[in-house]
Image: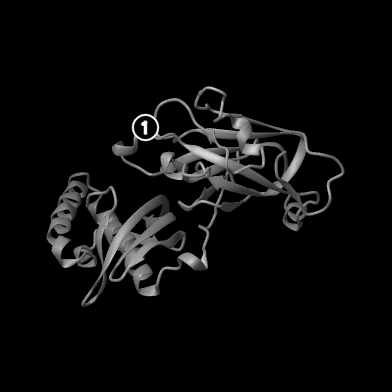
Amino acid sequence: MFWVLFSTPPASALDMTVEVSSFKVDFGLPYAPENLLDGDPQTAWVGGGVGPGVGQWIDLIFGVPVRVQRLGIFNGHQGEGQYDNFRRIRAGRIVYPDGVETKFWLRDEPGEQVVECRGRPFKSVRIVVDRVFPKGEATAIKKLAVSEIKLYLSLMPSPDEVANPSDEPEQLPVMPPTDPEFVVPDEMAGLLREFYVRHTSLADDFALLFAEDVRDHNDFQFEIFKEIQRQQRTYRKLRSAKVDTSGLGLEMVERDGSFARVRVFGSYVARIDDKDYPMEEDSVFVVSREADGWKIVEIEGQEF
């Protein structure tokens, strides 16, 4: 059986199939796509092919149009002792048959995570993987896994759908989710939002956001970056950029005394010459508590 939750009782059982971009072939097919809908998070679909899993997709296909309000995703292989042996979805998109997409982000933890959907009637939805946990060559042999997908359906149209039956952009803006269990203190959040403002606008005091023992290195790298912009004749435009970071979400990954790891994800907008340039982001910062407040120690996997 598979899990389907309705806001009102269904008239009949839902006819649904699942298709995937690939799956890991093994004796007895323990990683088949049917595991996504078997109601058991101890089993999992595992992607095949080469690479970490970016670009893999899952299609949920229905016998009749249905309104998917939310998807419950059990990320990674949640079988006993299996979670760290496989990659997990970090960020992705829900793609609808009419071409509209909505972005989503997941935490690197077991259990169900709920993704909001459009709630309009369609005969299929596609989940596309854009980023994965973990990154790095050391884990290149690990394959992407998802244990289970739970559907939350509605039998009635939403008020917004009735009022605006077709007034939607090609890509819906989605705010990153917030969870009180992973709240980031205001001072720390302000530091990380300021990073995007100063870096984008090539601010002279950018290096002051970093801890003193890494400041010189980052200042040197940033000066090289600014010189490249001068050569490309974009320096003056970037210096006047206005940066809106309201589309970024922040969550605490780990905190140990005066050190913390914070994930920043979502999007920010740079306004240059009266034109908006949206920038997608999904990075983990390491910050430390210094005498004059929180400072950045590193951005995992990045050089500045």
Of all residues, the one furthest to the bottom in this rendering is 291
Which residue is labeled 1 in the image? Answer: 141
Q: Residue at x 17, y 45 (%)?
A: 231
Image-based side of 94 in relation to 243, left or right: right
Residue 123: horizontal and vertical position, in percent?
Answer: 72, 35
Residue 86: horizontal and vertical position, in percent?
Answer: 44, 39
In front of the other: 193 or 72: 72
In front of the other: 135 or 257: 257
Image-based side of 94 in relation to 167, left or right: left
Number of residues whose C-alpha sits closer than 10 Å to that of mark 1, classed few (under 14), some (14–19) or many (20 or more):
few
Quick check: can you spot residue 148?
Answer: yes
- Please determine whether, in this image, residue 156 is positioned above or below residue 257: above
Determine whether the residue tagged by mark 1 lies in a helix, strand or loop. Answer: loop
Of all residues, the one furthest to the front in this rendering is 80
Quick check: can you spot residue 125?
Answer: no
Q: Amino acid at mark 1?
A: Ile
Residue 275: horizontal and vertical position, in percent?
Answer: 42, 53
Image-based side of 42 in relation to 242, left or right: right
The image quadrant of residue 17 is top right
The image quadrant of residue 54 is top left
In front of the other: 138 or 63: 138
Residue 59: horizontal and vertical position, in percent?
Answer: 62, 33
